[in-house]
Image: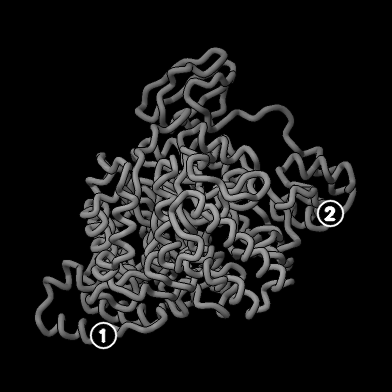
């Protein structure tokens, strides 16, 4: 690695090497570094370009845009313009008692954003709850996919059992055109809601409609299939909603909602990926887009109305959780569809040609490409982190908590340059103090808890920072081991964590015990050494069962349902702040919701629960788990 190229990369937060999951140092190909720098607008293809780019690197410490309340930050002479309009003179360090909020800092003739974040969030109430995939829920009135009415029924039932939290899979918006994106973790927008989850028959417009209209709407309802058909669902729901949508005055719309609705209308005409649209329509502020909004006013109004109905139904869900210790926890995805609404409206702060993923590891030997464009760290700083703030606000608008998927992405993300496979990428670093500070400030204002998904290979300071800032990390039964690889007894699990048996990207309890995760990946050719992986899985399975036996929770030769029950008893014994049960674990589902590294080869995000919501909460395994998890855990509070 050329020293000057390494210096330039470091100046822009681009890693020239990294430590893999086996704690081995891996050097990054210089060509990859050059390609990533190019996506940051930094020329480095030749030695002369590297020298010229080095000369343009700003020298000296930059004025911070996000600070912790009470931390000493010297800025010289200036003043802080508070968000309420007041001003505070500064001569040297920022005042330790500067109020929390989004302010402006004036130093000389320069004015920059200044967010003051709490040092830590309040302790999370000790409780238990559910983690559920919304699309998988169904009741007799469902239209082929879990909707907000189904979620309301789920929350109502959970509340009757005195559950303290419900963690929901992402409800972020997909682009409402065919083919519909199936993955909730590849949304079109993280600021708006997925219209597929709207309950058509729970809208005020349906209730107010005449008999003939209601009959026509009900005639469109799709039947339930073994696998969810997202396109079939949207075909039916969009036709039904068109029968119900009222006229709307576009002038009264929030600008962000107007942009999103305009994107949806343009996508119906020009396709789901804005990068293939006529060039004049590729920026929301373009005059041609303003003209198109007027031309497509009916469709823009339709999509805006659908979003309003989604927000109203999700607000009902939120109110149903008002008595829970925590309440509704929403899931923040790592990124967005590169051709979707946020990538269109936020293109100035995204590296649109880059995708993020993960380097090779034991579970995905070829690495992972999540096909999501990342925020540019330099652009976030220029904009005072407001794009990140607005996204968090949108997620917390109807919730009491936020789970940040791949929370290490607030520190660094694995950038894959255009045209490269997942293993030819490198890490790009972010200002973690700023990112975590914005998250803490918005959670504080919403009275929300924060859970950071810190599984897999993460920087060592991630989990410690979460603990220090009053945020929870994640503890998954399969991964709780000591330095020698032995399963940890429950008393040694971390207190500041949200614990579960598994996650959506990992085997279900029954799938793990049956080795289904190995069989499926081997059949699909995803394993370099299937026999070795089978041996590894057998060792892990033996270790977890031996732990359950040592804890007196199960007999050595117990059947799978008893082992699953014992796993939930294990969770109940941990000191973790929150423990989550998953319906898929308790009803014996072998298939995991998502198999990383696959697309159409596996039914990712398409597997419904085999029982209705009512049948789920009456299921013997669920009743047993509820009784186990309720013991010794406080579930009183004022969530919602």
Q: Nearer the viewer, residue 585 or 68?
A: 585
Say if 448 sits above or below 373 in the image: above
User: x, y percentage for residue 128?
Assistant: 35, 48
Q: Nearer the viewer, residue 289 or 545?
A: 545
Q: Is residue 286 visible?
A: no
Q: Secondary structure at mark 1?
A: loop
Q: Is residue 588 left or right of residue 62?
A: left
Q: Is residue 303 above or below residue 632?
A: below
Relative side of 473 to 25, left or right? left
Can see residue 477?
yes
Query: Residue at 26% across / 39% down in the picture?
Result: 637
The mark that comes first in sequence, 1 or 2, is: 2
Residue tagged 1: 220
Q: CA distance from mark 1 to mark 2?
A: 56 Å
Of 101 and 488, nearer the camera is 488
> Residue 101: x, y in percent?
41, 31
């Amino acid at each position: 690695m050329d020293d000057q190229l390494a210096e330039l990369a470091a100046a822009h937060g681009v890693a020239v090497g990294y430590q893999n999951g086996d704690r081995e140092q891996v050097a990054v190909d210089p060509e990859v570094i050059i390609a990533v720098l190019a996506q940051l607008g930094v020329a480095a293809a030749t030695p002369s370009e590297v020298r010229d780019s080095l000369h343009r690197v700003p020298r000296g410490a930059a004025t911070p845009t996000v600070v912790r309340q009470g931390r000493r930050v010297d800025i010289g002479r200036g003043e802080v313009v508070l968000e309420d309009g007041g001003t505070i003179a500064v001569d040297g360090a920022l005042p330790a008692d500067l109020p929390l909020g989004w302010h402006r800092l004036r130093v000389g003739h320069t004015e920059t954003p200044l967010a003051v974040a709490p040092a830590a969030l309040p302790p999370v109430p000790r409780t238990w709850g559910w983690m559920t995939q919304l699309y998988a829920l169904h009741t007799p009135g469902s239209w082929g996919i879990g909707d907000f009415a189904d979620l309301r029924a789920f929350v109502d039932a959970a509340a009757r059992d005195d559950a303290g939290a419900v963690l929901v899979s992402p409800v972020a918006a997909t682009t409402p055109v065919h083919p519909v994106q199936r993955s909730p973790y590849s949304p079109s927008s993280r600021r708006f809601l997925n219209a597929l989850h709207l309950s058509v028959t729970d809208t005020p417009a349906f209730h107010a409609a005449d008999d003939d209209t209601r009959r026509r709407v009900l005639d469109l309802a799709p039947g339930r299939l073994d696998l969810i058909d997202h396109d079939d669902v949207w075909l039916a729901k969009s036709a039904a909603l068109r029968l119900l949508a009222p006229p709307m005055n576009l002038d009264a719309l929030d600008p962000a909602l107007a942009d999103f609705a305009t994107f949806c209308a343009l996508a119906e005409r020009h396709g789901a990926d804005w990068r293939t649209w006529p060039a004049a329509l590729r920026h929301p502020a373009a005059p041609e887009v303003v003209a198109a909004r007027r031309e497509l006013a009916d469709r823009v109004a339709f999509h805006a109305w659908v979003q309003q109905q989604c927000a109203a139904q999700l607000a009902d869900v939120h109110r149903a959780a008002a008595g829970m210790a925590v309440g509704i926890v929403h899931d923040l995805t790592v990124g967005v569809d590169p051709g979707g609404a946020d990538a269109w409206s936020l293109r100035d702060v995204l590296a649109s040609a880059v995708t993020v993923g993960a380097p090779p590891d034991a579970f995905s030997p070829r690495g992972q490409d999540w096909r999501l464009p990342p925020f540019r760290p330099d652009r976030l700083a220029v904009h005072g982190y407001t794009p990140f703030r607005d996204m968090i606000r949108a997620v917390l608008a109807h919730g009491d908590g936020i789970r940040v998927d791949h929370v290490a992405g607030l520190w660094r993300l694995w950038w894959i340059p255009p045209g490269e496979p997942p293993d030819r990428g490198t890490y790009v670093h972010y200002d973690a103090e700023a990112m975590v500070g914005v998250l803490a400030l918005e959670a504080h204002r919403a009275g929300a808890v924060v859970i950071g998904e810190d599984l897999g290979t993460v920087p060592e300071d991630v989990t410690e920072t979460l603990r220090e800032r009053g945020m929870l990390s994640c503890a998954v039964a399969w991964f709780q081991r000591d330095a020698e690889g032995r399963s940890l007894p429950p008393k040694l699990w971390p207190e500041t964590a949200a614990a579960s048996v598994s996650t959506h990207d990992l085997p279900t309890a029954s799938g793990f015990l049956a080795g289904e995760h190995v069989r499926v990946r081997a059949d699909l050719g995803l394993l370099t050494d299937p026999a070795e992986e089978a041996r590894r899985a057998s060792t892990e399975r033996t270790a977890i069962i031996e732990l359950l036996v040592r804890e007196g929770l199960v007999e050595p030769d117990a059947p799978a349902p008893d082992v699953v029950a014992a796993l939930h008893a294990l969770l109940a014994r941990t000191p973790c702040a929150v423990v989550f049960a998953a319906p898929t674990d308790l009803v014996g589902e072998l298939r995991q919701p998502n198999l990383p590294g696959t697309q159409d080869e596996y039914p990712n995000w398409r597997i419904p629960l085999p029982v209705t919501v009512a049948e789920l909460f009456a299921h013997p395994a669920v009743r047993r788990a509820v009784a186990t998890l309720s013991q010794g855990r406080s579930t009183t509070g004022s969530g919602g």
